[in-house]
Amino acid sequence: MSALVFSTWSAVSPFGVGSDPFREGVRAGRSAIAGLDREVYPGPFAEGALVPDFSAAEHLGKKGTRTMDRVTAIAVTAVGRLLADGGPGLTDRPEETGLVLGTGSGSVQSIMDFTRDSLAGERPYHVDPARFPNTVMNRAAGQSAIWHGIKGPNTTIAGGRLTGLTALSYAARLHRGGHCARVLCGAAEEYSVQRAWLEWHGRDGADRESPLGEGGAVFLLETAEDARDAGRRARARLLTTRFRAFGAPDQGPGALAECVRDALKQVGARVEDIRLVAPVETGGVLAGVEEQAVGEVLGPVRPRWLGTRALLGDTSAAASSFQLAAVLAALEDEETASGGLALVTAVDRDGTAGCALLAAPAGEEG
């Protein structure tokens, strides 16, 4: 994998818009889960974690946002914040900047609303054509690129709770293949009644009570040299990513354990080097899988564990991107960044497992 660093990142989360509210919320361990307005969100969940007072018009302006759905607005806002934080010159050569954005199914609400209108209207074709683009999965990625003038490779990734990690892996491959000089990657998810019902029907047992969250996180990957030349600080190095599939829930721990072992072997690291573990914390039949798998690999080593599901709810496609953001925030703490590696893990009920291994950049380990 190409030697890439995370130099800038941004988040739109239930803590607020921008990386600072996210960083402060995670460090304080403050839950953003609250009661939902049952008139607005009459779904199966009484609680959720929504981005507070968020609308496309407020954060992006009224022009061009009338038909923009929520997940697209979240993504466009997150990308815009990252570009602003990255400093001038980041998009001077827009064709050299790529964008890889993860999503669950795009906007479930837009898809279902458009389909309903075609069935319930007087004529099937009596639908609002301006809202049709919201029904395609790559709407958020395409609008983010158009809105901010990014003209390099543009890719949409969907992979359940591994989405953020698979987007990260794909972004690194784009750079390694010489398709872009730098690449933005991340994932976004929206809360809607339609998504809530789909999640509820896809769960089992006590996991049905776990509230949902929404938001997105986006990262800038580039070489350490490019970051330094642009005056951006390398916040972490991306060492590697690993993925496996499994056929039954009881095979999940073994699949994830193999991912972690392969990652450590590839970069020549020891289990003692891992100081921080950030699991996505999938519930249901996969509850505890990450803890079991990582514990099997690390043995007596006891790193710090950092999870966000208890704070942000189940953010589905954005979950592993939020875990990456939490790791970057933690690596800024001197006690965490001192000479250690960070491991981000995820498993999904569709039978996939994966991990990413990060390290504090050389000369910046506190």
Image (cartoon, grey):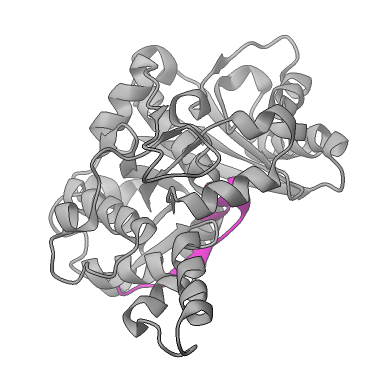
Q: Is residue 360 in view from this perspective?
A: no
Q: In which quarter of the image is the C terminus?
A: top left
Tell me residue 18's x, y (percent). 24, 40
- Identified at 56% across, 54% down, the residue is 169
Which residue is farthest front? 122
- Asked which quadrant contains residue 101, the reply is bottom left
Looking at the image, which is closer to me, 303 or 249? 249
Query: As displayed, is residue 136 above or below residue 84?
Result: below
Looking at the image, which is closer to me, 285 or 335? 285
- Identified at 50% across, 41% down, the residue is 315
Q: What stretch is highlighted in magenta?
A: 151-168
- Identified at 38% across, 65% down, the residue is 140
Magenta span includes 121:
no
Magenta span includes 166:
yes
Tell me residue 236's x, y (percent). 41, 35
Query: As displayed, is residue 59 above or below residue 269?
Result: below
- Asked which quadrant contains residue 48, the reply is top left
Looking at the image, residue 79 sits to the left or right of residue 322; the answer is: left
